[in-house]
Amino acid sequence: MPMWKAKLKNGKEVTLRFRRINDVNNLFLMFSSMSEKALEWSMAPYTKDRIEGWMNDLPNLIPLVSEYQGKIVGHAVIHKFPHERRKGTGELAVYLHDDFQNVGLGTAMTKRLLKLAKKEKMHRIELSVVAENKIALHLYEKCGFQIEGVSKDDFYGRDGKYHDVINMGLILSPL
């Protein structure tokens, strides 16, 4: 199974690899040790049952994790839409543990996923991000995603307010 190394801005080196079925406990540990702030714009909670459910969809995923000293510190995935009318398209999601934010891990994982998607001859990747999540917006723009629209009041935050969601996309290959 292929693995890749990524040197981060803080000098740490992480290993990127495909997610495995036996990663459930380590993924649960990562999510359960993340701060409220790190999960603010996510669809938490991430229970063991929910994470196990992700494992059942492996044929429709390009799932990566990043490890540092034996612990999972990042999880990024492209969900490949299985319907024929969505052929070659997918949706990106990236999650990073608090200790590994703003050090280049999100960029490394996203770029690796996009390379893997191109290798699988995928055509387009999309994502949605809450407008206030400026760090994620910067990451996605840096990786080539473009804003395609805004869904008004589409995310109900823990603050009891609705937030706009920015829809972004990236064409990997022309028809």
Image (cartoon, grey):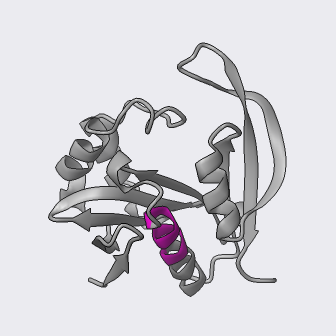
Image quadrant assignment for residue 101: bottom left
Residue at horizontal 15%, vertical 63%?
Answer: 70
Q: Quick check: is 108 in the magenta stretch?
A: yes
Can the viewer see residue 125 in this picture?
no
- 95 up-or-down from 157: above or below: below
Q: Is the magenta stretch mostly helix, strand or loop?
A: helix
- 116 up-or-down from 31: above or below: below
Residue 76 position, x and y percent, is 44, 60
Which residue is situated farthest in the top direction here? 160
Q: Quick check: is 19 in the magenta stretch?
A: no
Image quadrant assignment for residue 4: bottom left
Front residue of 23/9: it is 9
Residue at horizontal 43%, vertical 65%?
Answer: 105
Front residue of 155/121: it is 155
Judged left or right of residue 22, residue 59 is right
Residue 141 position, x and y percent, is 70, 63
Region of the chain picked out in magenta, as a range: 105-112
Residue 39 position, x and y percent, is 44, 36
- 78 up-or-down from 37: above or below: below
Residue 16 position, x and y percent, is 33, 73
Residue at horizontal 54%, vertical 82%?
Answer: 115
Q: Which quadrant would the N terminus be assigned to in this image? A: bottom left
Q: Which quadrant would the C terminus be assigned to in this image? A: bottom right
